Amino acid sequence: MRLVVAGSPAAAVPTLRRLAASDHEIAAVLTRPPTPQGRKRVLTSTPVAQAAEELGLPVIEATRVDDAVTAELVDLHADLGVIVAYGALLRRPALDAPRLGWVNLHFSDLPAYRGAAPVQRAVMAGDTRTAATVFQLVEALDAGPVYASDPFDIDPEATAGEVLAAMAETGAETVLRVVDGLATGTAVAHEQVGEPSTAPKTTIADGHVDFARPAATVHAHLRGVTPEPGAFALLGETRVKLLRSRRSGPTPPSGPTLAPGRVELVDGRLLVGTADDPLELVEVQPAGKKAMDGAAWARGLGALEGVVLS
């Protein structure tokens, strides 16, 4: 089939590459325009645009799908559109531009976690299982009928970024299976079943860690906001990024009893108190410095008496 593929972040690249390597033809790639990146604010193309250029595919760059972009899509005479995290809504007549409409790869077991941050919200909630779902795109948010939903087990120590990267690879195979099925006329979609939940985009405020909650909840929260928007706590008025944590289990009888946010070095590990068991801070990034081992950072503070993260 003749395809148009829409996507922007790195999570969309595996699907683009998998379709480009298939028997289907990619007529064009729709992605968002370059944006300033890094400390020097260098204008940088999206990961999808970079991959498309490497693959020699035509690229349409657009912040939104307006009348002019829709006309370009119509002129492609595509059989099917495939979208993975493009970053803007498609309305009619753009939805009707490809002969068979659009299918969307979404990283949740729909109708759970409809919205912009399904993986982050699932990890933050402590979920152990999710799914890569391919559904027919409709105007309502992530509400179309489902062609395929492949389960995915969430590693209890993985960050949201790591989970998303792994799901992007497996989801690419799900997409290809659906595209092949649509090409042969064997793919069948079923309406979503169950109570929908939402996954709104995370904000900087979501990164603030509350150590007054149980260790399992804090650990899940920290993993879910890593790498974006980033977990942090305050040491006085200074922000400390918390890059990785580990469940340490109950404090041994001979060890310290830690109040929420209170830090202590125990057997070479940096522990922080929560509402129940302590949590190990494996990697942190102090303000203005590079990422470093949590215990090494704590040793650099000197005496830890009275040191509390809030």
Image: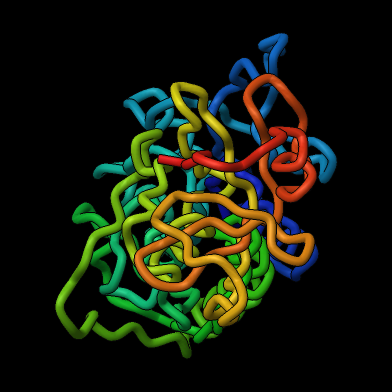
Judged left or right of residue 179, residue 189 is left
Residue placed at 76% from the left, 66% from the top?
267
- Name above or below for residue 288 compared with residue 32: above
Residue placed at 39% from the left, 55% from the top?
260
**Which of the two residues, 274 or 40, is positioned nearer the viewer here?**
274
Residue 256 is situated, as x and y percent measured from the top left of the image, at 55, 66
The image quarter in which residue 71 lies: top left
Residue placed at 56% from the left, 42% from the top?
305
Residue placed at 68% from the left, 14% from the top?
43
- Name above or below for residue 212 compared with residue 208: below
Q: Classify the position of the N terminus by image quarter.
A: bottom right
Q: Classify the position of the C terminus by image quarter.
A: top left
Question: Residue placed farthest to the left in the image?
Answer: 195
- Name above or below for residue 45 compared with residue 299: above
The image quarter in which residue 98 lies: bottom left
**Which of the two residues, 45 or 138, is positioned nearer the viewer here?**
45
Judged left or right of residue 222, residue 136 is left
Judged left or right of residue 229, residue 19 is right
